[in-house]
Image (cartoon, rainbow, N blue to C red):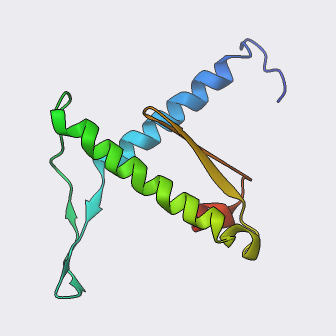
Amino acid sequence: TEFVKDMQILDGILIANEVLDEARRECVSTATTSILVNGSPTDEFPLERGLRQGDPLSHFLFLLTAEGLNVIMQAMVESNVGEQNHVSVSHLQFADDTLLVGSKTWANVHAL
């Protein structure tokens, strides 16, 4: 980028981090869902409860979710979904970190 008077180069990184944190908080605090009952969705309702920090189940549920994402991403890459739709996304996972690797395009976002 370019230099801004009276700002340090790392200020941009800190500002970007704050913007992402705020967006993440907004997504969590305004989340709604609906469920299928006999094949028809119910009205949306807010998500108000979750696992408490330190809950012994949280690690297991995270692993289930991470493994599900891993299987879906591997299937997408192996079935050449990316080549047919000009989408190129893969992933790396280690411990509790997931890194999605791909081009910055809306097609990739929609494919996910």
Residue 39 quadrant:
bottom left
Q: Residue shown at 51%/29% (left/top)? A: 18
Q: Horizontal and vertical percent for residue 89?
A: 67, 56
Q: Horizontal and vertical percent for residue 8?
A: 72, 12
Of all residues, the one furthest to the front in this rendering is: 78
Residue 32 vs residue 38, the one in the foreground: 38
Determine whether, in the image, residue 67 is placed left or right of residue 7: left
Q: Residue shown at 57%/59% (left/top)? A: 74
Pick the quarter of the image with the C terminus. bottom right
Determine whether, in the image, residue 64 is placed left or right of residue 14: left
The relative height of residue 39 versus residue 24 in the rendered view (above or below) is: below
Total number of numbered labels?
0
Determine whether, in the image, residue 57 is placed left or right of residue 29: left
The relative height of residue 97 versus residue 2 in the rendered view (above or below) is: below
Of all residues, the one furthest to the right in this rendering is: 2
Residue 43 quadrant:
bottom left
Q: Residue shown at 53%/35% (left/top)? A: 19
Q: Horizontal and vertical percent for residue 92?
A: 59, 42
